Amino acid sequence: VSPPSSEAGAPATGPGRPSRDPRAPVGVFDSGVGGLSVLRHIRKLLPSEHLFYVADSAQVPYGPKGADFVRARALHIAEFLLDQGAKALVVACNAATAAAVATLRERHPWPVVGVEPALKPAAARSSGVVAVLSTELTLGSEKFGNLLGRWGSSVEVLVTPCPGWVALVEQGELKGERARELVQRQLAPLLRQGVDTFVLGCTHYPFLTPVIREVVGPGAAILETGEAVARQLKRRLTAEGLLSPSEELGREAFFTSGDPSAVEAVVRRLWGEGARVEHFA
Ligand code: DGL
């Protein structure tokens, strides 16, 4: 049995196969609305790409769930995006990247770009202690263990799951007393331990950056990965001849496994008023 191939002779597209049309959309997904923090960087860097975004809101949060469950969801969403005609996939979720990126790459010959906590730049800039803020699934993964082994030896690295933060963002509650209280509770002990660099290892957390900044003060660095992911996507699309040649602006389409009107209200707050969210099963 030969693996799926995009080489001459093999059918390049078809049901369940990635599109080879440069005008096809890029699929992006997350457990919920967190991946919009990545999508905004993609939109900025690649204005003419069509971007199809899936929020798996019926299953959010992924963080406390098992890797097998999250991998199954990732494969299901990838098939949906393929059916929508996607040419490439961005896993805009650290937990789903840890659980599923290798499998997603094996399944189909398409560019698959994942996210991982920005430990390398953090280690390069910190003068002592780095904190990685993420979810249980990411922090407990083999992938994160490898990252830590590779970049975590020149600095002290503290890892912290941040319960409740994903729910704040899912509810569009980005400021106010409750948000500040939850962020403060998690970060105060880290500040006492001398952390000077905070790595946002969950794509929901960049939406809480203003509150995090208030709590950690102006001196500490807060690192996210969205821009690096957008650059990597651009490199991969370019290398595969899949970059959109259009001079017109691309459009976005949003899908959710949850309640479309509830999710739409939050997407409008985080993305913009024009956003419309459709249901997918
Ligand atoms: N936004 C996701 C991440 O980057 C996961 C959040 C969650 O569902 O637990 O890890």
Image (cartoon, grey):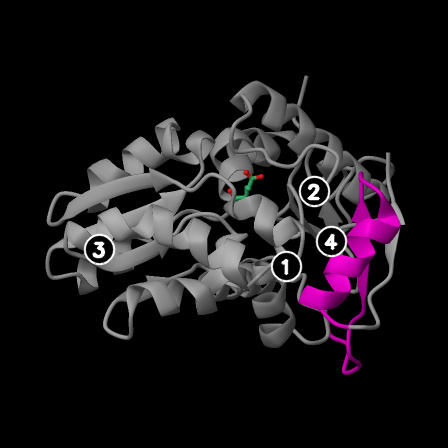
Which residue occupies 80% across, 59% down? Answer: 265
* Quadrant position of ligand 1: top right
Q: Which residue is mark 2?
A: 6
Q: Dot 4: within a 10 Å radius of its alpha carbon, few (fewer than 14), some, or many (20 or more) residues?
A: many
Mark identifier at residue 36: 1
Place residue 9 in its image quadrant. Answer: top right
First along the sequence among labels 4 and 3: 4
Place residue 247 in its image quadrant. Answer: bottom right
Which residue occupies 52% across, 54% down? Answer: 178
Q: Amino acid at mark 2?
A: Ser
Secondary-structure class at tag 1:
helix
Camera-side residue: 206 or 93?
Answer: 206
Question: Compared with residue 95, is residue 218 higher up or lower down, i.e. above or below?
Answer: below
Which residue occupies 35% across, 36% down? Answer: 144
Question: Compared with residue 140, is residue 7 higher up or lower down, i.e. above or below?
Answer: below
Q: Position of residue 246 (x, y in %)?
A: 77, 77
Residues at discs 4 and 3 in contact (Cβ within 8 Å): no
Give the total of numbered labels: 4
First along the sequence among labels 1 and 2: 2
Q: Is residue 22 visible?
A: no
Q: Point out the image quarter for the C terminus.
A: top right
Q: Dot 2: within a 10 Å radius of its alpha carbon, few (fewer than 14), some, or many (20 or more) residues?
A: some
First along the sequence among labels 1 and 3: 1
Q: Position of residue 158 (x, y in %)?
A: 23, 42
Secondary-structure class at tag 3:
helix
Q: In the shown orientation, is residue 49 left or right of residue 66? A: right
- C-alpha gap between disc 1 and disc 2: 30 Å
Q: Amino acid at mark 1?
A: Leu
Q: Which residue is mark 3?
A: 191
Q: Which residues are magenta?
A: 245-272
First along the sequence among labels 2 and 3: 2
Q: Amino acid at mark 3?
A: Leu
